[in-house]
Image (tube, rainbow, N blue to C red):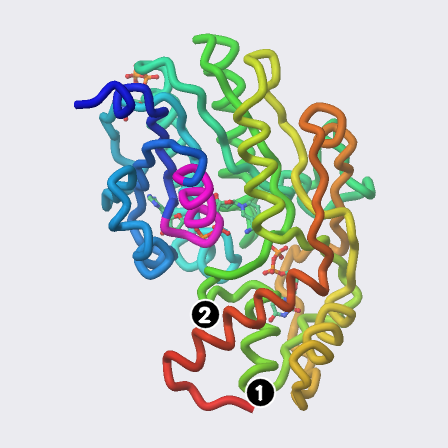
Amino acid sequence: MTLETLQKKKILVTGGAGFIGSHLCERLLADGADVLCVDNFFTGQKTNVAHLLGNPNFEIQRHDVTFPLYVEVDEIYNLACPASPVHYQHDPVQTTKTSVHGAINMLGLAKRVGAKIFQASTSEVYGDPNVHPQPEEYWGNVNPIGFRSCYDEGKRCAETLFFDYHRQHGTKIKVARIFNTYGPNMHPNDGRVVSNFIVQALMGTDITIYGDGQQTRSFCFVSDLVEGFVRLMGTGDEVTGPINLGNPGEFTMIELAQAVIRLTGSRSQLVHKPLPSDDPRQRKPDIAKAQSILGWEPRVQLEQGLTATIAYFDKVLSNSGIARR
Ligand code: NAD
Ligand code: UDP
Ligand code: UDP
């Protein structure tokens, strides 16, 4: 073993074969780390990380984080959890277990080896927010017994566990609250709005607007988000978060659909479908903390990010031989 190998930072990424996780693995390898990607492939794809397999500093392990994991690492990014409402509601009990048991196991691991641990929390901790935009101090408006609760309450409980491990055991924690993020490596059947609209536009099928389409979201491009992750992990032990990471540009779903139609040149029509229960009316991050503590703000505007994401889906659909437009 060379001295260089011994000095490399060993980083565990749970959920590393997923949409965001795969970009994070790529970034950490480029920064010179030794990366262990752990994933149960529930929503992740091997194709997202296939190009990294030849890299001697990359390793992948099939594992479910609801079971204990014994490895030796310096840092942990805990991303394992389905993020699309369609997928996290498919097996809601498993979703809560993934957030809660997964957090306990990864925190137990961090405690044993003295690793810094990052939690991919979510803007869903604010629920259907009555405060707009949402600052970190806002405690949220979450239904504890609805269809989204397995995700929202699971993530809230994970935050509780992170802060209790920090207070009780001195574990070094970094909690990021991620707002809607999109980009290449999303699964074509992911079910979230950006991938749905782009795939529908490219295939020339109807674009499905849930409800009246006046609800808003703020969309962050994945490269901006990953930069925020790395900056947060790089802060001193006094910085724990929670810290919002997202793009404050706010759009209605109708505006998003119109942008996708314009950028694809599609002839798809907008059709309205029922609004899922507890669907938040509005969402926009207050990123003052990320700006002042991390010196971070998003750089990629919606149109630019959508163009890159459209090119990705165009390729995926072409390769799968699906007829388009
Ligand atoms: P994704 O579904 O593409 O990735 C999640 C990954 O976790 C997948 O590879 C999946 O197979 C894996 N996974 C799920 N359950 C697991 C388990 N029990 N054990 C091991 N692996 C498991 O979603 P994403 O958008 O990449 O989200 C990554 C993380 O970021 C999630 O924790 C999500 O809650 C959080 N987040 C994402 C967004 C967003 O807009 N993309 C917003 C807020 C929070
Ligand atoms: N754990 C793990 N990997 C480790 C250390 C712990 O997966 O390297 C799991 C372990 O199975 C335990 C959980 O993390 O259930 C919490 O660990 P902790 O030490 O906090 O609590 P305890 O072992 O007392 O339950
Ligand atoms: N949505 C939509 N059409 C779709 C998928 C989603 O209009 O095909 C809406 C959804 O009702 C929500 C918003 O788009 O208001 C964002 O949904 P997504 O599932 O991407 O993420 P959420 O922020 O709700 O977790």
The residue indicated by pointer 2 is: 189
Q: Which residue is drawn at 24% across and 40% down?
A: 56
Quadrant placement of the N terminus: top left
- Looking at this view, is 87 or 74 the one in front? 74
Crowd around label 2: few <14 · some 14–19 · many ≥20 (10 Å) = few
**Is residue 195 shown above or below 12?**
below
Q: Residue 219 carries which label?
A: none
Res. 206 image quadrant: bottom right
Quadrant placement of the C terminus: bottom right
SS for dot 2:
loop
Image location of residue 177, percent across then percent down? 61, 37
Q: Residue at x 38, y 86 (%)?
A: 321
Q: Residue 205 carries which label?
A: 1
- Looking at this view, is 238 or 223 the one in front? 223
Q: Is residue 116 magenta?
A: no
Dot 2 amino acid type: Asn
Dot 1 amino acid type: Thr
Q: Does the magenta stretch include residue 19?
A: yes
Q: Is residue 26 left or right of residue 66?
A: right
In this view, which residue lies farthest toward the left?
1
Image location of residue 126, percent across then percent down? 68, 40
Q: Is residue 322 left or right of residue 307?
A: left
Res. 229 image quadrant: top right
